[in-house]
Image (cartoon, rainbow, N blue to C red):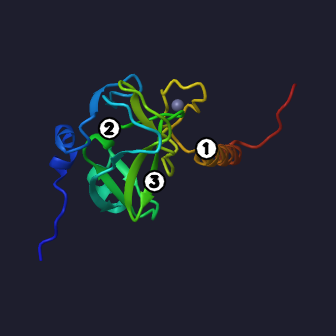
Amino acid sequence: MAMSRPDPLQARSREGRRKAAGPAHLVISNSSIDSDGVYTTEIIKKGSLVSEYTGTRMTCDEADALYDNHPRTYLFGLTDGKHVIDGEGAAAFINHSCDPNCEVDEVDGRVYITAIRDIEPGEEITYDYNLYDGDLEDLALCLCGAENCRGSMYAPREIERRAKAVKRREQAARKKGRSIKPGGRRGRR
Ligand SMILES: [Zn+2]
């Protein structure tokens, strides 16, 4: 039986993602948060479904192979920690905000974006990415501009974990530095 694998070129095409169906009142347009964002042309009431995060499901390993060294991906990590959705359609373009108007819920491996307050026509749709497991070099800086912006798209717990990891790395570097320094006393002569 032939395995159905995502075609890398198709998967990487931005235009291909845009064409995928999404709710009619969601439009993709320039955003001050990031290059593109998603806006609503109609009022969205608190608690209502904004969009499902649709796309090809794959394992994290498959995604790593497909997007190795790609600066920008549209991958949504599922809570099992082993699978991601390679986003297609409007939901893949929704930006992060530290003061979002939506939240994401995962139900049976499907991801839904729901309004947590009323959203006015023309407002940008956002949710908190709460990123985790990023490389220490990948700062995932946030430019959402919210008053409570934490400066990073990482989850608060992940920010703590990263700060500790950086500290450990610095301590290790210092130790190493000491051990290779030539011995001898230092001080004023
Ligand atoms: Zn922010």
Residue at left 33%, top 55%?
85
- Mark 2–mark 3 CB contact (< 8 Å): no
Q: Which residue is mark 2?
A: 93
Report, in whole angstroms, how far the alpha carbon at label 2 lies from the one at label 1: 23 Å
Residue 109 image label: none
- Furthest residue to the bottom? 1
- Residue 146, percent across and down? 54, 26
- Residue 68, percent across and down? 31, 50
Task: Name the N-terminal-most of marks 2 and 1.
Answer: 2
Residue count near mark 1 (Cα–Cα under 10 Å), binned few <14, some 14–19, many ≥20 = some
Type of the residue with mark 3? Asp
- Residue 43, percent across and down? 37, 31
Report, in whole angstroms, how far the alpha carbon at label 1 lies from the one at label 3: 18 Å
Residue at left 50%, top 52%?
133
- Residue 148, percent across and down? 61, 29
Report, in whole angstroms, how far the alpha carbon at label 2 lies from the one at label 3: 17 Å
Q: Which residue is mark 1?
A: 156
Type of the residue with mark 2? Phe
Task: Name the N-terminal-most of marks 1 and 3.
Answer: 3
Q: Which residue is mark 3?
A: 105
